[in-house]
Structure formats: structure tokens, C-alpha cells
Image (tube, helix red, strand yellow):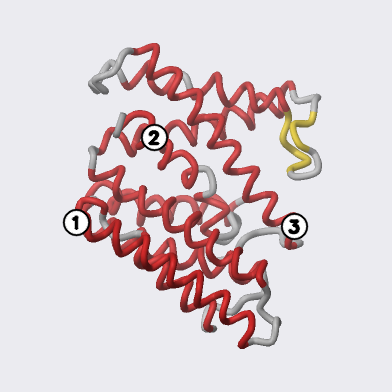
Amino acid sequence: MKVRTLTAIIGLIIFLPVLLKGGVILMLFSYLLAFIALKELLNMNMIKFLSVPGIISALGILIIMLPQGAGNWVNDLQLKSLIAMSFILLSYTVLSKNRFSFMDAAFCLMTIAYVGIGFMYLYETRSEGLHYILFAFLIVWSTDTGAYIFGRLMGKHKLWPVISPNKTIEGFVGGLICSLIIPLVMIMFVDFNIATWILLIVTIILSIFGQLGDLVESGFKRHFGVKDSGRILPGHGGILDRFDSFMFVLPLLNILLIQA
């Protein structure tokens, strides 16, 4: 517990100033987190980061995370690059004599989308305003806290035991309830320029998908037979273990609230 707490404190000391500063510093930090998360996923599937598929995947992350406000050429480059990478990865299945399979190629492409889009929206959300990124983080943290407390106090019915044996339906509902505190408090200080009832609905959706994001990453670990995605954060696991919920919440927040 001491190691876990110390890691959390050090992480906040590093991450919070970068988050508050935003801009290029946060964008570069987001790229760093994305490359670490990419390496963690590739390692789960026994694909080396310094390999042809690993390098192609890293290039994909580099391109998919380009700033969306840079111009239409970004979207054009992303589309053409994904098509090119698909052909290269599929061709590599032949060149590797099927040691790298069609399923591995699909895994790499999905990893590019999953990791790249998730972390791209980390700095894109911050660029829309500090209150949006704080809103996302507070929803995830309040959901996790509520799920833990309600699960420990009242949890009797397993939510998805095959994927995550410790999660309960009571914890899931408790997380939703606690997440609703965040918009009710924030609207007293921040104008989201949206009706309160709509903001509450958005919060519920984000809380649900935040918990789903956590289950998805748990599913990865179960499938590949690993306890944690990585070891970079002592007591917490890897970057994916800490950001799995945000990788679902941040894109949805942009779709439902910021770009709506």
C-alpha cells in the first residue's frame, strides 16, 4: 500500500502541472504515454516493439495523434496512412511465413486506433478548456471511488466474473451515483453552455463507458494471461491500467459535449 500511495503521489506531482500547462508540453507527454501503452499491448501479444509490426504501429500512433486543428491534410494523411499500413502489415504475414498472422495484423491496426485516439483526445480535450479535462478526470475518479465503496459495503452480485471477479453490480451503480455529484458541483463554478439535465445524461454515459473501458482492458489481460499491462508504475501496473477508462471517456466527451 505504501508503494502504491507513493507512486500515486509522484505521478500527480508530475502529471498535474503538465495537465494544467497544456499546449505542446501536454501533447508531447500524451505521445510518450501512448508509446508506452502501445509497447504494453504489443508485449501482451508477444510482438516486440522493435520489430516491423512494432515500428509500423508506432508510426501509426505518431500519425493518428496529429493535432486535429492542423488542417484537412491531417485527416487525409491519417486515412492514406492507415490504408498503407494495412497493406504493409498484411504483406508482412507472407514475408514472415505466417509467424506474424492475419490476426496479429488486425491486432496492430486496432491497437493503433485504440491507443492513438484515446491519447490524442487527452491533449485535444485540454485544448478546449481546462474545465473539460477536469470534468473527465473527476468523473472517472468519482466513478472508481463510488464503485469501490459501494462494492465493498453492499456488493453481492457479480457484474462480470469471467472478466473481473471483484466488480459487482452494486459497485457499478454506486459509481454512477457518485459520478453525478461532479456536474452538480461544477455547474456552480463553470458554464458548460448546456442544460443541466443534458449534462447529467452525458455524465451517466461517460461513467458507464468509463467502467466499460476498465472491463475492456481487464478482458485484454485475461485473454493474454497477464496480471498487469506493465510495471512502469509500481503498485499500479502499467499506463493502460491507469488510463483504460479515460481512453473511452475522452473521445466520448468530445463527441457528446464539446463537438455537439
Q: Where is residue 163 in the image (x, y as percent from the top left)?
A: 75, 45
Q: Element type at marker 3?
A: helix
Q: Distance between the residues labelled 1 and 3?
A: 38 Å
Position of residue 94 relative to residue 4, above or below, is below
Task: Give neighbour class at mark 2: few <14, some 14-19, many 20+ (Cα, 10 Å).
Answer: many
**Label 3 or label 2, whichever comes before in sequence order:** 3
> If the image is split into quadrants, where does the C terminus sit?
top left
Q: How far apart are marks 3 and 2 (CA)?
A: 28 Å
Mark 2 — residue?
253
- Judged by depth in the image, the label closer to the viewer, 1 or 3, is 1
Task: Give neighbour class at mark 3: few <14, some 14-19, many 20+ (Cα, 10 Å).
Answer: few
> Which residue lies at the image location 70% right of the left edge and 50% below the top edge?
219
Name the one closer to the observer, 181 or 12.
Answer: 181
Q: Say left or right for 129 vs 169.
A: left
Q: Which mark is residue 223?
A: 3
- Judged by depth in the image, the label closer to the viewer, 1 or 2, is 1
Q: How far apart are marks 1 and 2 (CA)?
A: 21 Å
**Label 1 or label 3, whichever comes before in sequence order:** 1
Q: Element type at marker 2?
A: helix
Q: Do callouts 3 and 2 mark residues in contact (Cβ within 8 Å)?
A: no
Q: Say left or right for 118 vs 224.
A: left
Name the one closer to the observer, 259 or 165.
Answer: 259
Q: Residue 70 carries which label?
A: 1
Residue 110: quarter of image: bottom right
Task: Give neighbour class at mark 1: few <14, some 14-19, many 20+ (Cα, 10 Å).
Answer: few
Name the one closer to the observer, 6 or 74.
Answer: 74
Residue type marked 1: Ala
